[in-house]
Amino acid sequence: MVHQRIERSCIADPMLILATLCFVAGQMAATAVRGDENWPGFRGPTGQGLSTATNLPVEWSSTKHVAWKRAVPGTGWSSPVVYKGHVYLTSAVAAERNKSKHHGLVTLCIDAQTGRDVWSTQIFIQDNATSPPIHEKNSHASPTPLIEGERLYIHFGHQGTACLDLQGRVVWKNQDIRFDPGWGNGGSPIVVDDALIFSCDGRTEQFVIALNKNTGKVLWKTPRPMITNQLKYSFCTPLLIEFGGRRQVVFPATDLVIAYEPETGREIWRVRYVGDSIVPRPVFGHGLVFVTTRYHSPSLIAIRPDGKGDVTNTHVEWSTRSGVPGTPSLLLVDSELYMISDNGLASCLDAKTGRRHWQKRIGGNHSASPVYADGRIYAQSEEGKGVVLSAGPVFKLLAENSIGERTLASYAIAKNAIFLRGEKHLYRIESPGKPDQDRR
């Protein structure tokens, strides 16, 4: 298990405590019960794709080890989240209104044990005639929901943001934050104290903003520095870290990554690079923040987050260009940093030095972010193949599992089950004979 390996490592490396256990994501407050029971936001309780769940399946198919499979209305690539026995996800459901084509932007709640509908709430209506175009790999419902306490935060980028209670009732909506997203929306929000924080890195305007999580009113708004890159848009989800007793929201964007004060939106430090359309979420550990720099031909840079101002020339510890993803997020487990590139090249590096342990092609195209659980790395290809690897500095392929359905959303893991969203269906995948304790 993750925590057992951490305890052994911390004796020699106290910085690992910061890396994995202390305040690495805004969603930490959402885990009111054991962390393996909930997956409350994008990349789980830590925001870094780590699960303490055990007894997960290694092999599956569209029917094998599938506890249930249910059709999902509409389209969307938001990842599922799981909280207290329910699965939440968003979708864009095509319809006509007054002879005008549009999408209803909806939130779905599904019973995690049975796959049955609990409730569905339409949050916004998107007029297709006036909405900006989206990338072929994007959808109108790509940002992942976020649960904190008894509140569900739903984000549709330039179409609006909302807060619901867990019964599907709308608490507040905000559609005042307007910008041209450039190929659609992608980044998900985080919660820090009373602030719901997300980026608006569009074609013509780029800024980071915080809404009051209780009211939806703007708390602060910070413009990005001037970007000279012709392609100015990015689609990244931030990561909350704590280093040296100071909290930082690390937010990659086109041509630079910036760490902000979550209370005020003031800049702490920045690192410059050349690159646009940033998607992968950062990870943090061993006193380093790991960030990718662009969608096409990306680099990976490891940054010490103890600087102030422009630290490009002083705080980049190491970098590499081999096998770096443009879409899937990174994965840090103990001292190993894992990457799955968009074209299916898997790599394992020493996180402290960047030295490569192994690099192997696992096939397919990848957009979903890999996760760690029960000593294994789980990666999902766009073609619907789930690849399971043994975690560690020696490459070992454990299984390849196809569901025969396109998949771009990332996994959610809760208890002994994997929740996987395909193009048309949501799956609950689990080993047979394992008791379900989601319902209490």
Image (cartoon, rainbow, N blue to C red):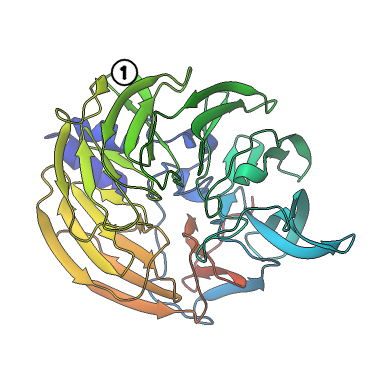
Percent position of residue 27, x then y: 49, 37
Depicted 384 relative to depicted 28: above or below? below
Helix, strand or loop status at disc 1? loop
> Which residue: 63% across, 40% down?
153
Depicted 332 relative to depicted 402: above or below? above
Based on the displayed image, in which of its 4 quarters is residue 301 positioned? top left
Based on the displayed image, in which of its 4 quarters is residue 325 positioned? bottom left
Along the line of sight, the residue nearer the viewer: 413 or 256? 256
> Which residue: 50% across, 44% down?
203
Percent position of residue 366, x then y: 38, 67
Left of 375 or right of it: where is 83? right
The amino acid type, in three-letter code, at marker 1 is Gly
Percent position of residue 173, x then y: 73, 36
Left of 377 or right of it: where is 85? right
Residue under numbered circle 1: 245
- Image mark count: 1
* Direction right: furthest residue: 98
Depicted 390 relative to depicted 44: above or below? below
Depicted 54 relative to depicted 23: above or below? below
Along the line of sight, the residue nearer the viewer: 71 or 391? 71
Based on the displayed image, in which of its 4 quarters is residue 60 positioned? bottom left
> Which residue: 58% across, 60% down?
139
> Which residue: 33% across, 35% down?
257
- Mark 1 packing: few (<14 Cα in 10 Å), some, or many (20+)? few
The answer to whether residue 27 shows anywhere in this view is yes
The answer to whether residue 394 shows anywhere in this view is no
Left of 94 or right of it: where is 252? left
Percent position of residue 110, x then y: 68, 59
